[in-house]
Image: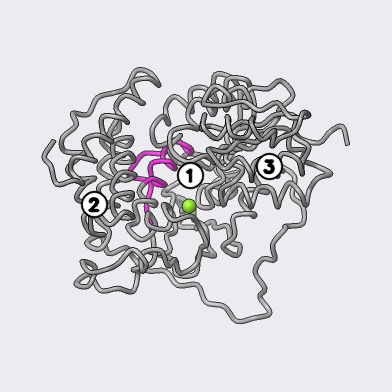
Amino acid sequence: MADRKKVVLLGATGSIGDSALKVIREHSDSLKLVGVAANGNWEKLAAISKEFECPKACLHSDEAWKKAKDENAFGSACDVLSGVAGLSELAEMNEVDIVLVAVVGTQGLQPALKALKAGKRLAIASKEIMVLAGQFVIEAANENGSQIIPVDSEHNALFQCLEGVKPEHIEKLILTASGGSFRDTPFSEMKNVTLEQALQHPNWNMGPKITIDSATMANKGLEMIEARWLFGVEPSQVDVVIHLQSIVHSMVQCRDGSFLTQMSTPDMTFAIQHALLYPERKQGVTSSLDFSEAMSLDFKPVDLRKYPCLTLARNAMEACGIAPGVYNAANEVAVQAFVEGRISFLEIARVIEKTLESVDNVEPTSLDAVLEYDLLARNLANAFAEGKTA
Ligand code: MG
């Protein structure tokens, strides 16, 4: 089994991590996990590291790292690193072929760039990487001949659809959106919705942040920005349509009016397996569509009045510079404030809007500058969420 692809998984304890481990477990003849990382869940990470006999692991949180060391949780066969430096060390290990980045927030930025500079395949699940630093990431991939395969279901679908399509033949990339928890809630009732209601996603079973982002469609906003960078299209070529069943994962509209789609049941293992095994295809780990049963696919246009976050994202994408990063940072802060009951659901968009309005847009010249503006935006958004005018 010498030709197994060696995989590093950053974000092993989250929901993408769970799905990735399912795929790696099932395809152990093709894939070998050699490094895992998590933020703070050291007990779960230690169990994963032992199961897959990983020689290296990393805990982003220093406190968790110390605790794991004290308990000797990983045993002596595993070298346990910490912090962003540890994540980066995993990402550029010599023997590694694929780095799957599924960590929350901006932690994944540096390791992703290191992986690309070291010529690894980057399987990218963390949206922040393309949203904050799309230009840097694409440059690093091009300069080093490294491959980026998106793991986000929509972008993975587009990647699959675009194989064999000439860039000049693309009219539009159309991201499908479930519409989230409030897709059937009338606009007039949106001001009273609760956290509990926001956490009920109609199709996907995901973490709380992305489920709220799906309800506001801030997530689809981030995905428009991701798509723009990943596939090198103009902002005007990225569009969104509501698709109730989450079976069509996105579409390419060609110049001649043909639409190419990728379909599967809504389960992240499909995109993850594609990104890890590409260009190989093997039996999936989850059962997919069954056309012996009747099935409908419904599409409808997005009511932008109901989803102001989507318009804010489009404006940020068109403005470019640091605006997409500010949008992302403000959204994260606002969602946290909503989860903690400090602001209402509709105020999420207002916090993002105010934050975008109060930062002068510039073109960031380095990753450090990107991270500085990220911090600035977070501080401003926090002040807005607290009802202060900063
Ligand atoms: Mg998605």
SS class of the residue under badge 2? helix
Disc 2 CB within 8 Å of nearest ligand 1 atom: no
Of the numbered discs 2 and 1, the one sitting upstream in the chain is 1
Residue under pointer 1: 169
Q: Does the magenta stretch include residue 239?
A: yes
Give me the residue at 69% from left, 48% from top. 21
The quarter of the picture where the N terminus appears is top right
Q: Nearer the viewer, mark 2 or mark 3?
A: 2
Q: Which amino acid does label 1 sit on?
A: His
Residue under pointer 3: 276
Residue 183 locus on image (x, y percent): 35, 69
Instruction: Answer above or below: position of 231 versus 120.
Output: below
The residue carrying pointer 2 sits among few (fewer than 14), some (14 to 19) or many (20 or more) residues within 10 Å by Cα, namely many
For residue 121, what is the image quadrant?
top right
The quarter of the picture where the C terminus appears is top left
Residue 235 locus on image (x, y percent): 34, 41
Q: In the image, which residues are magenta? A: 222-240
Q: Which of marks 1 and 3 is in front?
A: 3
Question: Which label belongs to residue 349?
Answer: 2
Q: Distance between the residues labelled 2 and 3?
A: 35 Å
Question: Which label belongs to residue 229?
Answer: none
Q: Does the magenta stretch include residue 346?
A: no
| Residue 262 falls left or right of residue 340 | right
